[in-house]
Amino acid sequence: MGFIGDSIDSLKSINVRQAFEQAITLGMIVSSALIIWKLLMCVTGSESPVVVVLSESMEPAFQRGDILFLRMGEDPIRAGEIVVFNIDRREIPIVHRVIKVHERNDTNAIDVDILTKGDNNDQDDRVLYAPGQQWLNRQHIMGRAVGFLPYVGYVTIIMTENPIIKYVLIGALGLLAITSKD
């Protein structure tokens, strides 16, 4: 009959106890994923320990679709490091290299101004910053790149650019989870 027909027949044969058990299992899987994500946040000190490179601005260092692993320590940020930063009123983080660091001793603490640029870009990132902003501050930095997996993030890019694929995949996985007999 085929996968869909077998799945529908399997759905018809599920009793309340099986459905409840499978819902609990699915909830545990989702909860485990969230716990692992929160644990990674604590270990790395970054609000987003894993990001996907979305553009070609960092080629040849990183390609579109690479997954970056981030860490945010207390060490000072230095020129040449690759950082991921968020700009006010923009929700998508940017992966670029630090080209200048300016330390200010205005108060007891040392404030740091940071200027970034994509390796594949002709000019610095001041045109990307918020209007009137010339430098990034430490609070804009989400983390430093400490490792990467090439091209693995293309799955995320494809699902973001083609939402129908995301919904079909989620639906198929949900159907598989509900109809599995184990």
Image (spheres, grey):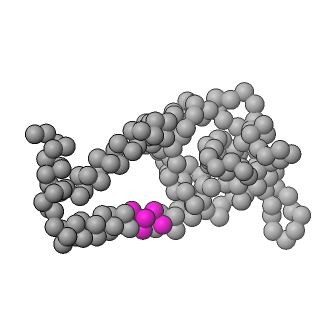
Task: Decide: is 54 above or below 38.
Answer: above
Q: Residue at x 28, y 70 (%)?
A: 24
Asked whether residue 53 is drawn in magenta, I would say no
x then y, percent, for residue 101: 77, 49
Corner quadrant of residue 46: bottom right
Q: Residue at x 65, y 64 (%)?
A: 74
Magenta-drawn segment: 32-38
Left or right of 71 in this view: 101: right
178 or 70: nearer the viewer: 178
Q: Quadrant of the N terminus?
A: top left
x then y, percent, for residue 59: 57, 30
x then y, percent, for residue 155: 41, 40
Q: Quadrant of the C terminus?
A: bottom left
Q: Residue furthest right?
A: 106
Magenta residues, dominant SS class: helix
Q: Residue at x 29, y 47 (%)?
A: 172
Q: Residue at x 61, y 62 (%)?
A: 73
Left or right of 64 in this view: 80: right
Task: Decide: is 153 above or below 108.
Answer: above
Left or right of 16 in this view: 140: right
Task: Decide: is 37 above or below 168.
Answer: below
Corner quadrant of residue 181: bottom left
